[in-house]
Image (cartoon, rainbow, N blue to C red):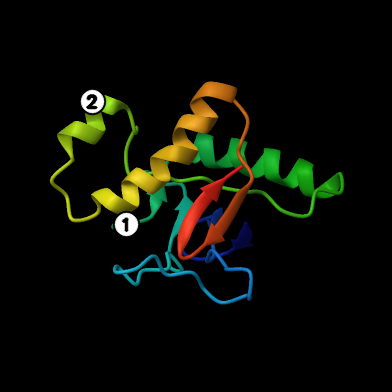
Amino acid sequence: MDTRLISYAIASALGVRRDAGGRAWKPAPYKRTGSALMIHGDCVSIGCYAMTDNKIEELYALADGAFRNGQKSISVHIFPFRMTDENMSKYGSSKFILFWDNLKQGYDYFEKKKITPDIRVINRQYVFN
């Protein structure tokens, strides 16, 4: 996470997922990178991940502690919704369903094992563990 002062007391830019060659990964055919996404407080947003000021302060304190103790980065895993089988069926007609089916593999891994999976990109698809 790249912590920056934007128009919020505490905000963090999520950055862009990179492929093995260091290029911004754009899941075909959507061509979106997520490069403008931020996590911030004030509980107001037009596309970022807004939360209460108390929660962003808690998140900041955890990140600060991790970095001060030598951690080099923090992975943030974001999903469009809780990817339960029920929700996948509910949103199954979306033009994004193939991409979401791919994301669900990582979601299910975490839900089952309660640890984040290793993630690679092969042929423009996420591969988990």
Q: Which mark is residue 30?
A: none
Q: Is residue 94 left or right of residue 20?
A: left
**Residue lying farthest right?**
70
Marks 1 and 2, Cα distance to the nearest angstrom? 25 Å
Q: Amino acid at mark 1?
A: Gly
x 77%, y 43%: residue: 66
| Other residues around mark 2 within 10 Å, as few (<14) / some (14–19) / many (≥20) | few
Residue that mark 2 sits on: 86
Percent position of residue 17, x then y: 54, 63
Q: Nearer the viewer, residue 1 or 108?
A: 108
Residue that mark 1 sits on: 47
As drawn, 22 above or below 74: below
In this rendering, which labeled residue sits more in front, label 1 or label 2?
2
Q: Nearer the viewer, residue 54 or 66?
A: 66
x 59%, y 50%: residue: 119
**Residue lying farthest left?**
93
Q: Are marks 1 and 2 in contact (CB under 8 Å)?
A: no
As drawn, 23 above or below 2: below
x 52%, y 73%: residue: 24
Q: Amino acid at mark 2?
A: Glu
